[in-house]
Image (tube, rainbow, N blue to C red):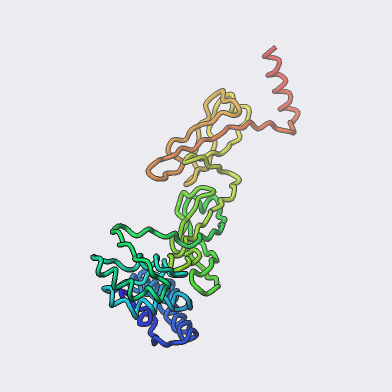
Amino acid sequence: MSKDYYKSLGVAENASKDDIKRAFRKLAKQYHPDRNKGNPSAEDRFKEISEAYDVLGDDNKRRQYDTMRKYGSFTGGPSFDPRYAGGFDASQFERFFRFDSAEGMDIFSDLFGSLFGGGKPFRQARPGRRRQQPKGPDAAVSLSITFEESIRGTEKTIIARNPGPELKRRKLRVKIPAGIQDGGKIRLRGMGFPGDNGRTNGDLIITVNVKKDQQFERKGNDIYTKATITYPQAVLGGRIKVKTLTKTINLTIPPQTSPGTKLRLKGMGLAVNGIQGDQYVEIQLDIPENLTPRQRELIEELARTFE
């Protein structure tokens, strides 16, 4: 056999189901990736014991595995693949055994024919790549962050289902990359639901929701904001203070600037994937609600000049 699942869990071949479960829990706790961050060997060991428990913890898979261990040497040492376990019939053994001659096929037929209801000869397995089986289901969660966090990046803690036979939840620390957009997704591979029959775990997909900001709006890598000017500034021009993503600057208002005009601040947007965005400032006009007598007099005098 290519894998000894009993040895992987450190149990005897006649171990009870409870003994196997206790051994798995103990080893899973010891080699869990959360306790061994940055340790590839521990990650490999965790995958090994998870695969072993998936087989030995299932009565049907265990019986098939034990049969393969008992008779495998007669056919040149087959490898048990838990992805194909469950509901075996004679034709399924072609996935586990290869024969280089008709003689080998005869030996296999004699050995397993009566055991599995065989009787017809097995056709020779054709060489080629083994078909990949689908992984387990993906899990999905949503995460809300502020606009500023989406711009600068952040780390958040989420609660996710623990991939494995235990129905538990655990906390995960997730790094949110700078520049992520509303609706952006982060995929954590292997952190989803367990697969059946030895398949790999699905992925955990995190959808990031970015809250609206009162001052800034994002469109691609460009940033949009608004600034209010007075009527004299609109006619005569001037300078006002405007906030960008990184600082406050003095923005020059050209003479005769109409409301709704968008002034471009080149290179003041986001830089994502090597693409630098701009910031656009939309000009709004401040119309005072309460005028002093002198202000009204001046405006009326100005109005008469246009007659």
Percent coordinates x, y for residue 94 in the rendering? 35, 65
Q: Residue at x 28, y 77 (%)?
A: 73
Q: Residue at x 39, y 79 (%)?
A: 66
Residue nearest the viewer, comparing 179 with 228:
179
Query: In this rendering, is residue 63 above or below 195?
Result: below
Q: How many marks?
A: 0
Q: Is residue 226 left or right of residue 155?
A: right
Q: Residue at x 27, y 66 (%)?
A: 99
Q: Is residue 237 left or right of residue 1?
A: right
Residue nearest the viewer, comparing 108 with 233:
108
Residue nearest the viewer, comparing 105 with 39:
105
Asked where in the image residue 128 lies, by quadrant, the reply is bottom left
Percent coordinates x, y for residue 43 in the rendering? 37, 71
Which quadrant holds the N terminus?
Answer: bottom left
Residue nearest the viewer, comparing 27 with 6:
6
Which quadrant holds the C terminus?
Answer: top right
Percent coordinates x, y for residue 49 in the rendering? 40, 76
Asked where in the image residue 225 lies, by quadrant, the reply is top right
Report the residue that reaches farthest toward the front. Answer: 119
Query: In this rendering, is residue 185 above or below 270?
Result: below
